[in-house]
Each structure stands twice: as structure tokens, then as C-alpha cells.
Amino acid sequence: MEAGFVRQVLVDWEKVPPDSYLREIPSLRGLRRLAFSRAVTFFVGENGSGKSTLLEAMAVAYGFNPEGGTRNYSFSTRDTHSGLHEALRLAKGSRRAMHGYFLRAESFYNVATQEEAYADGAHPSRRYHERSHGESFLAIAQDYLRPGGLYFFDEPEAALSPQRQMTLLLEIHRCAQGGAQFFIASHSPILLALPGAEILSFGQGPLHPCAYEETQSYQVTKMFVNGREKILKELLKE
């Protein structure tokens, strides 16, 4: 790919309070610099491992609203984001992103509500609340994903069926081939299979690259599918 919109992240820990919980996250502790060379970068790890925290901080540092939306969104339902963005510096490429979106599964309802408030005659609402949760998530991809854009997705598979996850994978691949850049925190073994993507693991110590087959999402899914009866018998025994 061409030089990405975000080439690397630099962390100044002097700007993080000494008593901040951010200093206690193993995957982030001591992280000073993180470089990116792929069109799509996945963040993987167990719940609470720090992947969404870093993704959120990067999105906010780039200028996106903490609750999500395009860079034109400016509202706050409740400030729950960490202060990590204040310690980040994003080294940007020479290109300027013409499009972009920050999708957060946990606050999408708020963004969909705000989208209605922003609507006018020239920009009619897409009425996400009138669709199912999954249909709304997929509509975001169809409405906002463009080649040459910058996208931050936090668990976009949350409302999508396996089939719709494959549709989203196709949309991501199409846009990435056209010069878009993606940062995605995900547990989906379907999305993580995207060819050419880099996977960064937030589990078991410092942040590090890993292969698709090394992710817990792949390993646990494979183990369950191949040994369902044995696993269920063990899990459900009294």
C-alpha cells in the first residue's frame, strides 16, 4: 500500500498520571512506539486487554468524536473514554484522508440518534433506528466506507451474522485495495482472516504481532467446532 494515513503511534507516558489504570495494562505498559505498514491492522486480545482503549485513543487523537461517527460529529452523551489520547502523537503520512468513520459497537445507539439530529433537507437521515442492529452496522459500511478513507472499528462484528461478517470483510478488502486504512479491534475469526492484514495481539505480555492461526478467536472456534460434543459435555457436567 501507499504510505498510510497513520504511520506510527508515539506514547509519552509523562502525560499519563502516575496512578492511572493505563499504566497497569500489560499490553500497553512501556509501549513507546508502534509502527504500521499494512492497509488493515487488527487488534486482538481478551476482554480488558487494552485493544479498545488504544483504538479509541488513536481515533480521538486523529480528531474523531469519542462516541463515534465521522469527524464532523461533535457531541457527548457521557464521557467514559480514557485520557490516553492526550499522551499519543500520531505520525501521519503524506496523504490526507478524504473520508473516515469511527464505529463503536457499545455507543452506536447514541451515534444513530445524533445522526437523526444532524439531518436536514440536504442531508436526510439514513434512519438507522428503523433497521435491525445488524442491518444498521452493515449500512454504515455501505454508506461511509470509501477508498482513500481512514476507519477505526471497535468490534464491528458485534451485531452481524457470520454471513454479514463476510460481506463486511469484502467491503473492507475493497476499500483497502483502493487506498483506505483500517484499524479494527475484533474477536471475529472471519474478519481476522482478511488476507494481507497485520494482527497485533494484546494478550500475554507486551503488544506483539501474531499469525491468524495463533489468535484465540481462531483456536477456540476451531476447537469448539471440531470437538463440540466433548467440550459441551465437559462444560455442562454437574
Image: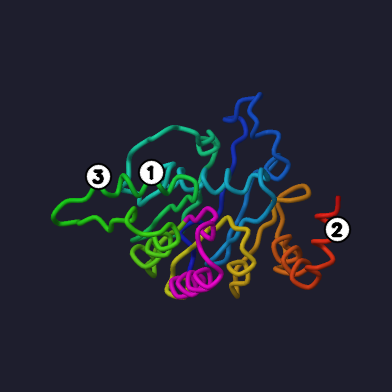
Q: Position of residue 231 (x, y in %)?
A: 82, 62
Q: CA distance from mark 1 to mark 2?
A: 40 Å
* Label 3 CA crowd tier, 10 Å (few <14, some 14–19, many 20+): few
How far apart marks 3 and 1 lie (CA) works out to 11 Å
State if disc 2 and disc 3 touch (CB < 8 Å). Answer: no
Query: What residue does disc 1 label?
Result: 110
Q: Quadrant of residue 221?
A: bottom right
State the extent of the magenta-drawn residues as a range. Answer: 152-175
Q: In the image, what residue occupies the spot 37% across and 35% down?
A: 76
Q: Name the amino acid type tagged 3.
A: Ala
Tell me if mark 1 has few (under 14), some (14-19) or many (20+) residues whose alpha carbon lies within 10 angstroms of its own: some
Of the two numbered discs 3 and 2 on the same chain, state the one appearing first in sequence: 3
Q: Is residue 43 left or right of residue 90?
A: right
Task: Decide if residue 33 is in sight here.
Answer: yes
Q: Decide whether residue 166 is among the magenta residues.
A: yes
Q: Which residue is mark 2?
A: 234
Q: Is residue 150 left or right of residue 219?
A: left
**Mark 3, residue position:** 117
- Residue 1 visible in the snapshot: no
Closer to the camera in the image, 79 or 238: 238
Q: Callout 2: few (<14), some (14-19), or many (20+) C-alpha neighbours within 10 Å?
A: few
- Residue 205 tag number: none
- Under circle 2, the secondary element is helix
Amino acid type shown at disc 1: Asn
The amino acid sitting under disc 2 is Glu
In the image, what residue occupies the spot 29% across and 49% down? 115
Residue at the spot x=60%, y=75% of the render?
A: 195
Of the image marks 3 and 1, the number of the one nearer the N terminus: 1
